[in-house]
Amino acid sequence: MPFKHPPRRSFVLLAVYTCSMRTFSLLFAGIALVMLAMLVIYVVRGPVDPVIASGIFVSFVACLVPALLLLKPFEPPEALRRRREEARRAREERRRAKDDSDRGSGS
């Protein structure tokens, strides 16, 4: 059974989705960095209330976890490599088939 290629529009939607998720996760990472800076400043400046310090730390972790989960690839590297290799082979086969059909119609 030959490989059916999805419409090109789905690739555009996938690229937009990936870019927006990466931006969203980087926004979370930026907020987590600000929360960490606030915690460090709060602890260094003077007497620390443990409730406030723990609240800032929980906010830092709450922003960091989604950022790391969204930035992490959804597939293991081996699966990504295998999928790229299969796509490359399929492109080569299509190119060879196209070249063969072009040669055959030229006679």
Image (cartoon, rainbow, N blue to C red):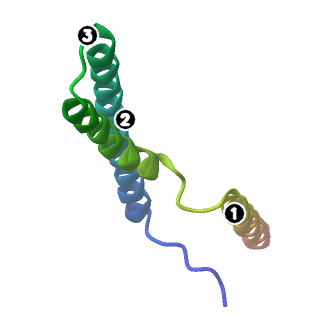
Tag shown at residue 46: 3
> What separation in Å lies between label 1 and label 2 (alpha carbons)?
37 Å
Q: Amino acid at mark 2?
A: Ala
In the rendered structure, which amino acid carries the disc numbered 3? Gly
Q: Is residue 62 above or below residue 76?
A: above
Q: Where residue 71 appears, x then y in whole percent?
A: 47, 46
Q: Nearer the viewer, residue 63 or 99?
A: 63
Marks 2 and 3, the one that precedes in the sequence: 2
Q: Which residue is identified by label 1?
A: 91
Numbered mark located on residue 29 in the image: 2
Quick one: label 1 or label 2, which is nearer the N terminus? Answer: 2
Q: Nearer the viewer, residue 35 or 77?
A: 35
Measuring 33% from the left and 33% from the top, which residue is drawn there?
32
Q: Is residue 81 above or below residue 105?
A: above
Q: Position of residue 26 (x, y in %)?
A: 37, 36
Relative side of 15 to 75, left or right = left
Q: CA distance from mark 3 to mark 1?
A: 63 Å
- Where does the image place residue 92, in percent across and percent down from the top left? 76, 63
Asked if disc 1 and disc 2 are in contact, CB closer than 8 Å, the reply is no
Q: CA distance from mark 2 to mark 3?
A: 27 Å
Give the label, 3 or 1, closer to the camera.
3
Cβ atoms at labels 2 and 3 below 8 Å apart: no
What is the crowding at mark 1: few (fewer than 14 residues within 10 Å), some, or many (at least 20)? Answer: few
Looking at the rendered structure, the secondary structure element under dot 3 is: loop
The quadrant holding residue 75 is: bottom right
